[in-house]
Amino acid sequence: MQYHDAKLLATAANKAQWPPESLPEIIFCGRSNAGKSTLINALVNRKNLAYSGKTPGKTRLLNFFTVDGRVIFTDAPGYGYATSDKASALQFEKLIDPYFRERQALKGMILVADARRVPNDDDISMVEYGRHTHKAIIVACTKADKLSHGTLMSNMNKIASVLGVNRKALVPVSAMKKQGIDELWAEIDRLIG
Ligand SMILES: Nc1nc2c(ncn2[C@@H]2O[C@H](COP(=O)(O)OP(=O)(O)O)[C@@H](O)[C@H]2O)c(=O)[nH]1
Ligand SMILES: [Mg+2]
């Protein structure tokens, strides 16, 4: 386990609040409760950098974290807990869409998906959106510790096929057992070059 120097750089409700483009950026997207905050914390080996709470869908902003002066992790609001379809469409339009379209520094997306669940329409749309905007896509399959090896492997095949991505784009991770973290870092390193 490596030491990482990570800190919150900016919190943005709109484009005017984005930090200046300096380093390659990777956005973390996923359903509320998929394990996004926990995964970001595990990647930087910290307990509480990205808020990892029991109240899902609390963050409605883009949070930018600089890591090792080398990469910026952007934490997007989890989807699936917006109060209405309209609220979630608005959030996408205001927050996510301009960032994917206009941010040159954005190199790729990590879709955070619970390894126990079949991806839903929101997950599928998110992947299609990443592809449409020409971003590299990695799928982190979280909570791998909750499954037997056999079930994990068959679920991952299913997740890849439902999302329409190459099976090789999937990385099983367990923040709890600290498994898959080095492998995910290797993928991130590849994306940021
Ligand atoms: N067993 C296990 N639980 C996890 C793992 N990652 C996240 N969780 C749990 O899943 C729940 C949601 O995690 P959180 O990071 O808050 O999800 P977020 O809404 O996507 O940010 C929390 O209770 C976490 O403790 C993991 O790798 N293993
Ligand atoms: Mg969270």
Image (tube, rainbow, N blue to C red):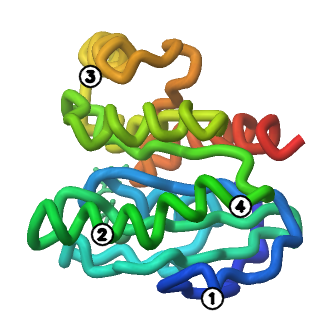
Where is residue 128 drawn, in percent x and y? 44, 32
Residue tagged 3: 148
Q: Quadrant of residue 131?
A: top right
As drawn, the residue found furthest toward the left would be: 84
In percent of the image, x 73 and y 47: which residue is there? 107
In percent of the image, x 19 and y 78: which residue is there? 55
Within-10-Å neighbours for mark 4: few <14, some 14–19, many 20+: some
Residue type of the residue flagged with mark 1: Gln
The one of 102 and 120 positioned closer to us in this rendering: 102
Q: SS of the residue at dot 2?
A: helix
Q: Is residue 145 visible?
A: no
Q: Quadrant of residue 137?
A: top right
Residue tagged 4: 103
Residue tagged 2: 90
Q: Is residue 66 above or below residue 165?
A: below
Question: Of the residues tagged 1 and 3, which is closer to the observer?
Answer: 1
Within-10-Å neighbours for mark 3: few <14, some 14–19, many 20+: few
In percent of the image, x 67 and y 41: which residue is there? 182
Q: Quadrant of residue 20?
A: bottom right
In 3D space, how far apart are the residues under numbered discs 1 and 3 (Cα atoms)? Answer: 44 Å
Residue type of the residue flagged with mark 2: Leu
Mark with earlier residue (3, 2): 2
In percent of the image, x 59 and y 63: which residue is there? 99
Q: Is residue 70 above or below residue 110?
A: below
Q: Is residue 148 left or right of residue 170?
A: left
Residue tagged 1: 17
Where is residue 39 drawn, in percent x and y? 48, 57
Q: Is residue 106 left or right of residue 76?
A: right
Q: Are marks 3 and 4 in contact (CB under 8 Å)?
A: no
